[in-house]
Amino acid sequence: MTAQAPLAEQRDLFEIPTEICYLNCAYISPLLRSTAQAGKVGMERKLRPWEIRPPDFFSTTRQIRSTAASLLGSTANDIAIVPSASYGLATAARNLPVREGQKILVLAEQYPSNYYVWEALARNSGATLQSVARPADGDWTRKVLESLDSQTAIAALPQCHWSDGTLVDLAQVRQRLDETGGALVVDLTQSLGAMTFNLESIRPDFAVAAAYKWLLGPYATGLLYVDPQHHNGDPLEMPIFSRRNAVQFSDISYRNEFEPGACRFDVGEVANFALLPALHDALLQILEWQVPRIQESLGQRTTVISTEARALGLDVVDSARRAPHFLGIRFPDGLPDGLTEHLRDQQIYVSVRGDALRVTPYLYNTEDDLERFNHALRSFV
């Protein structure tokens, strides 16, 4: 992919005090000022419920489906609105066949939302849950491809590992699954909005992203992509707003038919007047910035930090095998005691995930933030 022009620093769009160095977007992103305002305005609509008309329960969901489709490269009909990654993954598990003796493939130390549901499905179906061991060289793709065979019913994978950003080449996985006949379920929570995603080459059966990280949305919001072959599947709930002509509130008859598309997989009470306007505002801002430019800009930030970490003798996965917006820093003798406390005392915020110090900057991070972190790291090492 050709290099994209990086974006200017965007800190003014967020309410982050100068003294705060927040390098923890993979944990939970701060809201944009405009997103918080959109949620506030949406919440205040219920102060005057007499002004809310039946079409208002559907208008923002339509906008989100359209905007999310632009982000994913799908159609609006392929998008369901869900409250969490686990909800979307449970939907996938309900709609993909697994027989006794087959396998469900996951990564070692995969995020629990993308593990528990498959553990339960394997137990209930008589299948085997196969965990791919972490490769010493960071090459998840090779290990996954070696593990796929004709007994693999589902490969449930992220685009990048949540602990350190190490990548899985999902296009290669999809090609192999085409040969073996397995389904692909993708958790994009730690990548959608910060990293490009090629729907045409990856072709997941289902792909989900919780919105409170790299999509900059509020908590309890998310997006679920559903391949058209599964549009007539079984939803977790029976949402009334997904039924044919549900906007006619005066018609009290029961409707057995759903509207076409993935909306049948929406969470109940999907018309959330506070959360949905906030989510839509965040998605619009990401589209305005453009994901390739976000990716390039974040990659520059992690390069500054990784260069310093390597100079200090610390281990960082090579940029070719990790997501540009992610950095997992490992110490030769393990994470030192008191490291995160040392950073927090200086109002520098990162996460520890497994044996890695996870550093995940965003567009609100300045050159001063990066230097502050590097200086703190040097002083501790």
Image: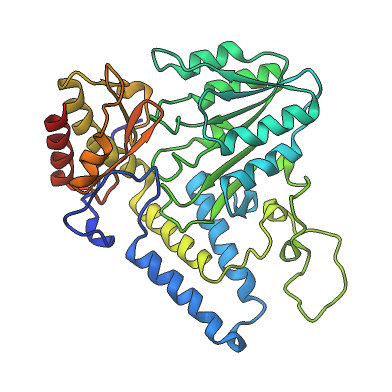
Name the residue: 31% across, 21% down: 334
- Residue 271 visible to the viewer: yes
Where is residue 360 drawn, in percent x and y?
Answer: 32, 39
Q: Looking at the rendering, which quadrant does residue 24 occupy? A: top left
Name the residue: 54% across, 63% down: 63
Where is residue 116 drawn, in percent x and y?
Answer: 63, 35
Q: Looking at the rendering, which quadrant does residue 361 occupy? A: top left
Name the residue: 15% across, 35% down: 374
* Front residue (pair 58, 99): 99
* Front residue (pair 136, 339): 339
> Furthest residue to the front?
337
Q: Quadrant of the N terminus?
A: top left
- Residue 4 visible to the viewer: no
Where is residue 349 drawn, in percent x and y?
Answer: 27, 45
Colour basis: rainbow
Q: Examine the rendered structure and indicate whether residue 148 appears above or below residue 337.
A: above
Residue 328 located left or right of residue 106: left
Residue 171 located left or right of residue 152: left
Q: In which quarter of the image is the C terminus?
A: top left
* Front residue (pair 150, 381): 381
Where is residue 353 drawn, in percent x and y?
Answer: 40, 32
Residue 44 located left or right of residue 91: left
